Image (spheres, rainbow, N blue to C red):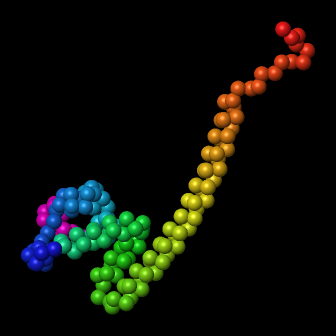
Amino acid sequence: MTAAARSKEATGRTFTITDLALEFDITPRAIRFYEDVGLLSPGRAGRNRIYTQRDRTRLKLTLRGKRLGLSLQVIKDLVDLYESPSDTAQQLSAFLRTLKEHRLLLEQQREDIEITLAEIAQHDERCRRMLAAASKPAARRRPASAPKA
């Protein structure tokens, strides 16, 4: 980002809901939902929402957390910690705990997926063998009492 761009952001640039929706490729409805859960708190100019750089940053962090698979409540807690005046060590420790918990959950899900995929492979192979056996023509046998031609 250029110095001019940083200066412009620092001067209090504001955004509309449409601006943010287009920038982050999400719907205005999603942005309003994030407001409802307390992640964003835009100002108002009449009926229009006015978002600050702070709201934009919170939205960016929210979407990043969602990509990581974090719940909105966990994202809110982390973003609130990020903005709190407390020391960085507390914030980093909280984030590390969250990452550890999320990693354990993902590792368990990966194990469950691997087990399920192995079961699917077994069922797949069994079904293919059964189909192959069913499609082979039956050996033509002559009954023992049938006269020979």
* 144 in relation to 48, above or below: above
Q: Toward the viewer: 36 or 122?
A: 122
Figure quadrant of residue 16: bottom left
Q: Is residue 32 above or below residue 5?
A: above
Residue 70, position as x, y percentages in the image: 42, 69
Q: Quadrant of residue 63?
A: bottom left
Q: Position of residue 120 (x, y in %)?
A: 60, 50
Q: For the point 67% across and 40% down, which residue is it?
A: 129
Residue 11 appears anywhere in the view: no
Which residue sits at x=16%, y=65%?
15
Name the residue: 37% across, 90% down: 89
Q: Is residue 84 magenta?
A: no
Extreme residue in the top direction: 149
Q: Nearer the viewer, residue 46 or 63?
A: 63
The quarter in which the N terminus is drawn is bottom left
Residue 11, image x, y percentages:
10, 77
* Vertical position of residue 98 compared to residue 32: above or below: below
Q: As displayed, is residue 27 above or below residue 73?
A: above
Residue 99 in view in this figure: yes
Query: Given the current orientation, which residue lies at the most extreme right position?
Result: 145
Give the quarter of the figure containing the C terminus. top right
Q: Total number of numbered labels?
A: 0
From the viewer's perspective, tell me whether residue 93 is left or right of residue 15: right
Residue 44 lies in magenta, yes or no? yes
Residue situated in front as seen by the camera: 79 or 143: 143
Residue at 42% from the left image edge and 66% from the top image edge = 69
Query: With 98 as the anchor, is 61 left or right in this view?
Result: left
Determine whether, in the image, residue 37 is placed left or right of residue 43. right
Q: Name the quadrant containing residue 24.
A: bottom left
> What residue span does the magenta drawing correspond to?
41-51
The picture places residue 116, in percent across and down from the top left corner, at 60, 56
